[in-house]
Amino acid sequence: AKHLGGNTLQFFTERAQRATIDYLQMENQLRKALVEGQLEVFYQPRLTLLDDRLEAAEALVRWRHPQQGLVAPAQFIPLAEETGLIIPLGEFVLREACRQAREWQRSGLADIRISVNLSVKQLRQGNFVSLVRQVLEETGLPASMLELELTESQLLDDIDNAINISRQLRALGIKLAIDDFGTGYSSLSYLKRFPVDYVKIDRTFICELEHSAEDAAIVRAIIAMAHNLELQVVAEGVETQAQMDFLKDQRCDEIQGYLVSRPVPAVQLAELLG
Ligand code: C2E
Ligand code: CA
Ligand code: CA
Ligand code: CA
């Protein structure tokens, strides 16, 4: 048994070492990707249920890896968060999304607000609000056409700082959304403390909507509560007509999901808009 234990330990050590090397290698590759322009922003539209308009689109980063092809954010955002690379990465996505939205606006396509995901690390930078102001100025995008998404857990991580920055951003005219709503550990009551405009119901409550009475009840409750607080509601991950019909019945404001469109490159979104 002792012998086996030794082998097991050695096995784990080797594995851990290999994982560390892969991680380091990936960090260097990601650093290079930022400099060499391998990161790309895809866009997924949001549809209003009341009048059938594409009124916003979420910016979702992709990595066009020279060997591995298109890499999804789940594969590299956690690493970026851990290494601090999320700061330049987030700045790239913000600037690129604002530039793109302004270009669509200039070329006469329907005005579409652009929604950008934030990491709590970006909020903790002392100068985040001035960075946003600078990017809007540089690109010429009106503040009302920018929306920023934060998850519940990120907001709760440093509640006073988050409230303070949220106030400043909204004073500029920027819209704010709470992302992945319902997945955090918080009670619903804290919502009224946050100056936000949108609540995005997490996909996990939407995917079983037709078969789960519990999920249906939760979604109904979130919509009712958000509306009572004068917030608008977006349902994420809507894939079926039945889900859409349910959400329409419940007066959900907007849907986002494969039923409307997958996240697509900028040129393809322009075709959807045009
Ligand atoms: P998220 O912010 O919750 O984004 C929604 C995710 O759900 C996207 O995955 C989208 O492709 C996926 N999705 C949309 N509709 C459907 C649907 O109908 N069915 C299913 N199964 N999935 C759907 P994606 O693009 O892989 O992004 C994953 C996560 O990575 C995002 O989740 C967000 O947390 C993070 N992320 C993406 N881009 C950025 C970024 O620029 N900055 C930061 N900080 N995080 C980002
Ligand atoms: Ca999001
Ligand atoms: Ca989400
Ligand atoms: Ca998510």
Image (cartoon, rainbow, N blue to C red):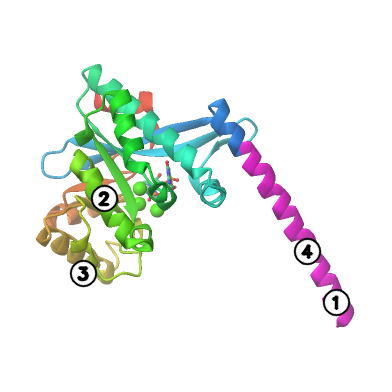
Please give the label number shown on residue 13.
4
Distance Cα–Cα, label 1 vs label 4: 14 Å
Q: Which mark is residue 166?
A: 2
Q: Are marks 3 and 2 in contact (CB under 8 Å)?
A: no
Residue 89 coordinates in the image, percent (x, y): 48, 38
> As shown in the figure, which amino acid type bears the numbered disc 4?
Thr
- The residue to which callout 1 is attached is 4
Q: Distance between the Cα atoms at labels 3 and 2?
A: 18 Å
4 vs 2, front mark: 2
Q: Secondary structure at mark 3?
A: helix
Question: Is 23 within the magenta?
Answer: yes
Whole-number angstrom distance, CA of label 4 to CA of label 2: 44 Å
Image quadrant holding the N terminus, namely bottom right
> What residue is shown with label 3?
189
Of circles 1 and 2, the one toward us is 2
Precedes in sequence: disc 4 or disc 3: 4
Mark 3 → mark 1, Cα distance in angstroms: 53 Å
- Contact? badges 1 and 2 (CB < 8 Å): no
